[in-house]
Image (cartoon, rainbow, N blue to C red):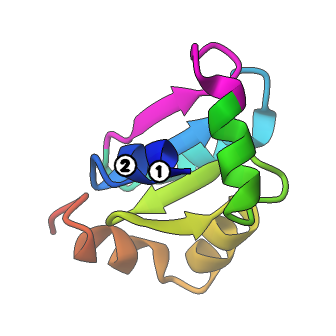
Amino acid sequence: MDMVMKLGGSSAVVMFTKSSCCISHTIDTLIRSFGPNPIVYELDTHPNGKQMEKALIELGCQPSVPAIFVGKELVGGANEIMSLNVRGKLKQLLIRANAIWV
């Protein structure tokens, strides 16, 4: 779990995904549409992917991917990101995390 938290805090936006997950791709596209360039860890291709996936599940991510950290904090998965976007709060979250500037 420590490794995931450390990686999650390594940049303004960090995503844990799987290359075969269409929802992960959709969330990645949505976040990039605001301007940030997130660090993306694809768990199915990463050497420690299985360990990281287990840690994400322990942190409460169900399903484990996508899991998004913004501003060094775990925001959650696709549902949380989509909810923030629908309510108009995703952009403000990215601004507060210094992921984008206006």
Q: Which residues are magenta?
A: 37-50
Q: Amino acid at mark 2?
A: Lys
- Contact (Cβ within 8 Å) of mark 1 with mark 2: yes
Judging by the rendered image, the residue that carries numbered circle 1 is 2
Identified at 78% across, 34% down, the residue is 22
Identified at 62% across, 52% down, the residue is 67
Work out whether residue 37 or residue 76 is closer to the camera in this orientation and state it.
Answer: 76
Q: Is residue 5 left or right of residue 37?
A: right
Q: Residues within 10 Å of mark 2 (few under 14, many from 20)?
A: few
Judging by the rendered image, the residue that carries numbered circle 2 is 6
Up-down: is 86 above or below 41?
Answer: below
Secondary structure found at label 2: helix
Q: Is residue 95 left or right of residue 82?
A: left
Identified at 59% across, 22% down, the residue is 48
* Mark carried by residue 22: none
Work out whether residue 63 or residue 23 is closer to the camera in this orientation and state it.
Answer: 63
Q: Determine if the magenta segment contains residue 43.
A: yes
Q: Amino acid at mark 1?
A: Asp
The quadrant holding residue 102 is: bottom left
Q: Determine if the magenta segment contains residue 53.
A: no
